Amino acid sequence: MDKIIKEDTKDEKLTTVNEKEELLKNLLEKLKIAETKYGIDITEILKKDVVRTDDVTTTQFSKWEEFIKNTNLLKGIENMDYKYPSPVQAASIPYSLEGRDLIVRSKNGTGKTAAYTIPILERIDDNKMMPQCIILVPTRELALQTSKMCKKIAKYMKIEIVPIYGGIDLHDDILRLTQGVHVIVGTPGRILDIAERKIINLKLCNILVFDEADKLLSFEFKDSLDKIIKFLPVDRQILLYSATFPSSVCEFVNSYMNKPLHLNLMKELTLKGVHQFYACVEPKNKLFCLKTLLKQLNFDQCIIFCNSIQNVELLTKKTTEMGFPSYFIHS
């Protein structure tokens, strides 16, 4: 892609006006198919009110007090303005409190993080200053985000939550962990490193959570996960949360989980109010099609994702040259 962007991508690459018109026609036809098939109106996207599906909105059929007894935790939940459990929370928390292994499928934005955080905090013994739960996440950004939410919910509790991840000095993680911790939120590589160095004792760590389990169960993390699980007690509880699950989940379930309960809270892959469409184009024509879309959709702001840092910077330059002032951010 970066090679393609570097090349001269001006209109002379499309040798004739007819070629450009044909390309645009094909692109719009594909978008029209998406409109017809999936009910997407690309010209009205920004005008429609965002509505919530019933797997996002809170349910008043249950109350927090029905399964949470810790008054300080209830105070933290109230402080987060969680008046009622969302469907994924109401469905999964009672089983999580029982110690059941769970495979929970629910869209982003439905309250998955709180769905596993709240029962974990309810079960933690704050008198034992040892790791009692590990929350695995695929990226350091998610480690920080998740630990921040956990700390907010545990605001009135005496529970130590520590995020650890690669990219920073290992000494900093060691220092924080040796001061005492109940819940560790981190990436597989750094957690394995800490465990192998015997910096922490995991004999009481009987809860293992996979947030964004689809990414964690990819081949990239397999060896690390196998090794991490060996450090945990045999009677551990494993909780998988994700919007999608790869076929590799079957192998993991058979190897490590004990009669897991499957909870599927998804009726469709995306939230209402979020419209999706795609168009297949030749790589050499991507920039031209992007320019056409930016003009056709006529919105004030947008976010474009790329698959590398170099592409981000190159595409920012090109879109600015097209007349769409752009700025880039990357890690």
Image (cartoon, rainbow, N blue to C red):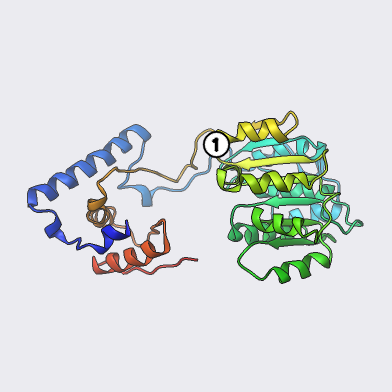
Q: What residue type is labelled 1?
A: Pro
Residue 313 seen: yes
Number of marks in picture: 1
In the foreground, 226 or 140:
226
Q: Is residue 253 left or right of residue 278?
A: right
Give x and y (percent) for residue 201.
Answer: 84, 55
Q: In this view, does 21 lie to the left or right of 168?
A: left
Which residue lies most toward the right here?
127
> What SS does tag 1 mark?
loop
In the foreground, 133 or 91:
133
Residue 187 seen: no
Q: Is residue 77 above or below residue 248?
A: below
Give x and y (percent) for residue 216.
Answer: 60, 46
In the foreground, 244 or 7:
7
Q: Residue, x 74% and y 51% (percent of image)? A: 134
Q: Residue, x 34% and y 62% (percent of image)? A: 300
In the foreground, 99 or 265:
99
Q: Which image quarter is the N terminus in?
A: bottom left
Which residue lies most toward the top here?
259
| Mark 1 residue crowding within 10 angstroms, few (<14) / some (14–19) / many (20+) | few
* Residue on which disc 1 sits: 246
Give x and y (percent) for residue 93.
Answer: 74, 40
The image quadrant that residue 30 belongs to is top left
Q: Residue, x 50% and y 66% (percent of image)? A: 331
Q: In this view, does 265 lie above or below 310?
A: above
Give x and y (percent) for residue 8.
Answer: 19, 63
Q: Is residue 157 above or below residue 231?
A: below
